[in-house]
Image: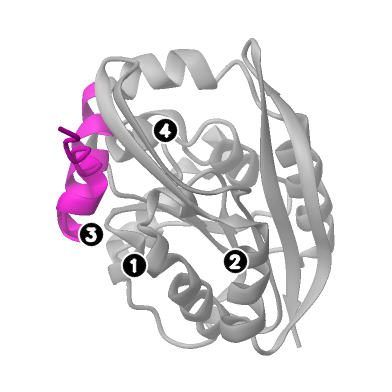
Amino acid sequence: MATEAPPDLASTLSPEELKAIIARGYDTIAPQYLAWSGPRPTMTRAAYVAQLLDLLDPGASILELGCGAGVPTTQTIAAHPKKFHVTGVDISAAQVALAREHVKVPEEERAAEEERVREIGRGRVAFEHADMAKLHYEEGSFEAVLAFYSIFHLPREEQPAMIGKVVKWLKPGGYLLLNMNTKDEVVHREDWMGAPMFSFGIGLEGNKRAFEEYGKGLKILVDEVAVEKVGRFEETFHWFFAQKE
């Protein structure tokens, strides 16, 4: 007699339960993940970040969604001679704690940074522990929003709407730079570096539809599928670089 296959775990959990597992997972593996990922910056990301920072004016405000331990992207932004303002956000409290340790303004700016914090409550470099899907910023708050290897940790139904939120946060002329999974799938790893982990994809066509439906007002500058070397493995991601008109 045939028996029904058990449902996949993701289908039995709510979006909030899934994100709680992801947050706890990154809390658990924060030091291991930094040791693994820190020395392996991907060339695709580095090239896009360099291109973006060249386009931005000095003092521009940048939001990084899924900043992790701040290595390498937030560090690069904070140390840039154009003195950008950067806010890093991550769902993992442990990752945010590591980012605060690893990312600081240059030594010669420390006194001014401390004064800025006393006066307005936040410095040129700031971090926030939050679920990106629940963030609220005023319209036109940032010249650029970045999201590297993070959008795919949102459940599939939340990914298109996240793009819509980001468009509102961008100033006219501002830039969006992110990557997404290429496959329409749910990936559940029971033990990823020592913790359970989920990631989600809506597929290449799903990604394009998300930008068409929720990215109104964006001019797509780059829509690229790139293969990257991640440690000993090759992985494929869907990159979008866009500007708000």
Question: Residue 127's spot in the image, x, y percent?
Answer: 36, 51
Q: Which mark is residue 225?
A: none
Q: Are marks 4 and 1 in contact (CB under 8 Å)?
A: no
Q: Tell me which label, 4 or 1, sits earlier in the chain.
A: 4
On-image quarter of the C terminus: bottom right
Main secondary structure found in the magenta portion: helix
Q: Which residue corresponds to the image point at 64% horizontal and 10% vertical from the top-left?
A: 232
Identified at 83% across, 52% down, the residue is: 51
Q: Which residue is mark 4?
A: 69
Is 108 placed above or below 148 here?
Answer: above
**Disc nearer the start of the sequence (4/2):** 4
Provide the residue span drawn in magenta. Answer: 1-28
Residue 56 as seen in the image, left or right of residue 39: right
Q: How many other residues sit within 10 Å of disc 3, few (<14), some (14-19) or many (≥20)?
A: some
Query: Which one is in front, 58 or 207?
Result: 207
| x, y percent for residue 11 | 23, 52
Give the residue at x 40% y 21%.
33
> CB atoms at circles 3 and 2 under 8 Å apart?
no
> What amino acid is labelled 1 in the image?
Ala
Left/right of residue 106 with respect to residue 157 in the rendered view: right
Residue 187 in the image: state x and y as whole percent: 40, 38
Which residue is the site of mark 1?
133
Residue at 52% in and 21% down: 37
Q: Is residue 120 left or right of residue 175?
A: left
Q: Is residue 112 visible?
A: no
Q: Is residue 7 magenta?
A: yes
Q: What's the CA distance linking mark 1 and mark 3?
A: 11 Å
Under mark 2, the amino acid is Gly
Question: Could you say whether the residue bearing mark 3 is in a helix, strand or loop?
Answer: helix
Residue holding disc 2: 206
Horizontal side, residue 47 vs residue 230: left or right:
right
Distance between the Cα atoms at labels 4 and 2? 29 Å
